[in-house]
Image (cartoon, rainbow, N blue to C red):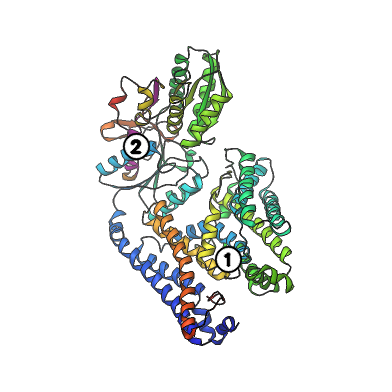
């Protein structure tokens, strides 16, 4: 066999790898130019990165859209990045990236109160302000927490709602997000206390976890109804959970017999409110929450506030807010959505 | 047979430079240079630190995975072993075990997980694809079963900081020493020992290897045990780096490892590949993800780009083999050849 064949094959490899390298190079470079030149000025002006628990979650789509509007009204640059699945390790990568970019502020909904702490502190060391919203970290890892509603207020409104609907007696269950979601667990604890103290005839028979995944939540609802045939009500303090449970109930023979309430968004729940599966559910306005987080981030970056208790700042049309204990800002009271008012809300 | 030896007719520099491995290394350098000059903050030391920390579990597992794939087998259960060892570390720590003891137990369990794979593949003779799909579900199920959906996060901070500590002012994570040590051991075993020659022989033909004196069963068994143990080590690192032991830690990591190994020039059919190429493959994926993330590109697009790169790299091997086959046929008149062209040296 002649050496020529081998040589041509080898040259082929070389040519292909060089061309691969070159195309990879040039293609990416053209894409890079605008952002490359833009970033020089970005360091000076407000740049806010929103990191939701996971991407594609309608709740965060709404809250982050509110944040985007606020950031842009302040003349800053907004971006939203995050993991596909709601896991702390996925968030760490994006927190790290933001730290590398020295963005002026990070707005994070934490998947774990401790696991993302080191990454957040690393970012803060580089001058980035950290605001948590929706789900907090331990206080030493952030500058401010924007609380959507007081846990007491939320737990109470949901318990009051379900007990009123089932006539204050019978079995109920809770369909939550993931078992280590900070906010959900705090609410569930308060609900348990409220039930024990004020509703002796209502029995909480089960707490199940749908992991904020539509299909899992749907399946868990089906399983709940099968395991507990006498179930009279379900509380789902998560928007993904209540929508999946609503979808299951509205096509099952338990529709109207098993009450469902919890925290949901009007767009996802409209159908189930209108067809009678759900009487009433609760929430704050996530868009306001995102906006408040953005205004708080801006106030921290500008140095108007440092995040200590008693600091006050103005959040555009939302009004004036005061920093409370544990460097926390409270958005306000929960809101009840029902057939009478749901069409006024488009998120 | 002259085809295989023809490569040695070329000078050494040529045999080293014009290979698949060299192409991947060249790509790593090209992409790094592009990112260095075009992506803001890519040149920062912090980027190097985070990049290496991100790829460390993949680098570690890719070492035994390379050997496993060269024998023509595959181990899909690695990420589940990562999850299981992560959970074990968390649960044992909660029960009051010190981190080194808990880590050691996790490593032993990892090795046992590998031993089960190895037993079923090497002794019983079941296909590794089926076996490790089964144990992928089994080990992940155990991990989630032990800890449920909760997480252990109260690891002592001196240990979590140790996991992301850097060497002096270099920005290189200190844990890279562990990888380096393992890389040297695996390189010696694969490229400079009779054991390694056996690994290639098995990949080229299990029966032939057996008749030429290679202990096929034992070799495969050892490789699966190593794969389990190293995956458990990656799990310990992963847990301490993120300070979070969860049953679903590192889900899907097996695909990133296998992608990097194939990108690095290892043949999925076995018998061909080098560790240097694999390390370059892992780094290539790490650098691309890091640079794109810094550009603000979302994870979906990053996955599309890496997926395309992988498909291209696999296609390029086949296309080049075909090109060289056609060239060979033309050179020798229309003499048909059944030798898989280019197997020896690409």
Magenta residues span A279-300
- Residue A121 on image: x %, y %: 47, 48
Labels 1 and 2 touching (C-beta < 8 A): no
Q: Are marks 1 and 2 on the same chain?
A: no
Residue A320 lies within the magenta run: no
Q: Quadrant of the N terminus of chain B?
A: bottom right
Dominant secondary structure of the residues highlighted in magenta in the image: helix
Which of the labelled discs sits on residue A122, or is there none? none
**Image point (48%, 57%), residue name:** B50
Q: Is residue A289 visible?
A: yes
Helix, strand or loop at mark 1: loop
| Front-most of residues B84 and B269 | B269
Quadrant position of residue B297: bottom left
Helix, strand or loop at mark 2: helix
In the visual, does A83 lie left or right of B238? left
In the picture of the structure, the residue carrying the numbered disc 2 is A62
Quadrant position of residue B198: bottom right
| Crowdedness near tag 2: few (<14), some (14–19) or many (≥20) residues, C-alpha within 10 Å | some
- Residue B74 on image: x %, y %: 61, 59
| Front-most of residues A116 and A255 | A255
Q: Nearer the viewer, mark 1 or mark 2?
A: 1
Q: Chain of mark 1?
A: B
- Residue B42 on image: x %, y %: 40, 62
In the visual, does A318 lie left or right of B286? left
- Examine the rendered structure and indicate whether residue A160 appears above or below residue B275: above
In the picture of the structure, the residue carrying the numbered disc 1 is B269
């Amino acid at each position: 066999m002649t050496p020529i064949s081998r040589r041509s094959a080898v040259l082929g490899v070389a040519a292909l790898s060089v061309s691969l390298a070159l195309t990879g190079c040039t293609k990416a470079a053209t894409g890079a130019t605008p952002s490359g030149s833009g970033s020089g000025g970005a360091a000076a002006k407000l740049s806010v990165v929103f990191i939701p628990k996971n991407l594609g979650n309608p709740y965060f789509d709404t809250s982050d859209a509110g944040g985007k509007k606020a950031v842009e009204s302040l003349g800053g640059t907004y971006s939203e990045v995050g993991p596909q699945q709601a896991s702390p390790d996925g968030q760490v990568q994006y927190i790290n990236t933001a730290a590398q970019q020295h963005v002026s502020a990070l707005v994070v909904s934490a998947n774990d109160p401790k696991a993302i702490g080191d990454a957040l502190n690393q970012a803060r060391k580089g001058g980035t302000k950290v605001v948590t919203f929706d789900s907090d970290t331990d206080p030493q890892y952030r500058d401010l927490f924007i609380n959507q509603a007081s846990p007491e207020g939320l737990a109470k409104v949901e318990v009051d709602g379900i007990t009123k609907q089932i006539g204050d007696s019978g079995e109920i269950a809770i369909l939550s997000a993931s078992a280590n979601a900070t906010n959900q667990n705090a609410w569930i604890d308060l609900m348990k206390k409220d039930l024990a103290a004020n509703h002796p005839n209502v029995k909480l028979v089960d707490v199940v976890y749908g992991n904020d995944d539509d299909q899992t939540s749907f399946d868990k609802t089906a399983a709940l109804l099968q395991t507990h045939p006498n179930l009279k009500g379900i509380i789902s303090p998560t928007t993904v959970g209540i929508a999946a449970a609503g979808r299951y109930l509205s096509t099952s023979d338990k529709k109207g017999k098993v009450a469902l309430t919890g925290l949901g968004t009007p767009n996802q729940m409209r159908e189930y409110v209108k067809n009678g599966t759900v009487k009433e559910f609760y929430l704050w306005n996530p868009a306001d929450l995102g906006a408040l987080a953005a205004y708080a981030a801006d106030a921290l970056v500008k140095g108007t506030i440092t995040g200590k208790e008693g600091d006050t700042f103005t959040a555009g049309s939302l009004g004036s807010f005061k920093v409370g204990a544990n460097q926390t800002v409270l958005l306000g009271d929960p809101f009840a959505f029902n057939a009478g008012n749901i069409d006024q809300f488009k998120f | 047979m002259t085809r295989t030896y023809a490569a040695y007719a070329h000078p050494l520099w040529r045999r080293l430079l014009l290979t698949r491995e060299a192409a991947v290394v060249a790509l790593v350098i090209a992409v790094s240079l592009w990112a260095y000059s075009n992506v803001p903050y890519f040149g920062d030391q912090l980027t190097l630190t985070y990049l290496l920390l991100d790829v460390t579990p993949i680098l570690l597992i890719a070492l035994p995975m390379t050997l496993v794939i060269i024998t023509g087998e595959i181990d899909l259960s690695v990420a589940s072993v990562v999850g299981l060892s992560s959970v074990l570390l968390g649960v044992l720590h909660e029960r009051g075990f010190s981190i080194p003891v808990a880590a050691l137990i996790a490593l032993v369990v990892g090795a046992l997980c590998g031993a089960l794979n190895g037993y079923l593949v090497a002794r019983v003779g079941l296909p590794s694809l089926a076996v490790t799909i089964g144990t992928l579900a089994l080990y992940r199920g155990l991990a989630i079963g032990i800890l449920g959906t909760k997480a252990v996060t109260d690891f002592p901070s001196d240990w979590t900081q140790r996991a992301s500590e850097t060497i002096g002012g270099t920005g290189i994570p200190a844990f890279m020493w562990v990888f380096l040590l393992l890389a040297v051991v695996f390189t010696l075993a694969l490229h400079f020992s009779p054991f390694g020659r056996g690994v290639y022989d098995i990949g080229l033909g299990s029966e032939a290897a057996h008749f030429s004196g290679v202990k096929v069963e034992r070799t495969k068994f050892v490789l699966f045990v190593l794969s389990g143990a190293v995956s458990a080590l990656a799990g310990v690192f992963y847990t301490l780096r993120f300070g979070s032991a969860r049953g679903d830690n590192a889900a899907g990591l097996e695909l990133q490892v296998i992608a990097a190994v194939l990108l690095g020039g290892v043949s999925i059919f076995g018998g061909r590949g080098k560790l240097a190429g694999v390390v370059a493959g892992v780094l290539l994926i790490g650098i691309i993800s890091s640079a794109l993330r810094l550009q603000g590109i979302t994870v979906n697009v990053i996955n599309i780009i890496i997926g395309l790169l992988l498909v291209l790299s696999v296609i390029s091997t086949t296309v080049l083999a075909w090109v060289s086959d056609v060239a060979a046929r033309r050179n020798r008149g229309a003499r048909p050849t059944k030798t898989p062209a280019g197997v020896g040296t690409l």
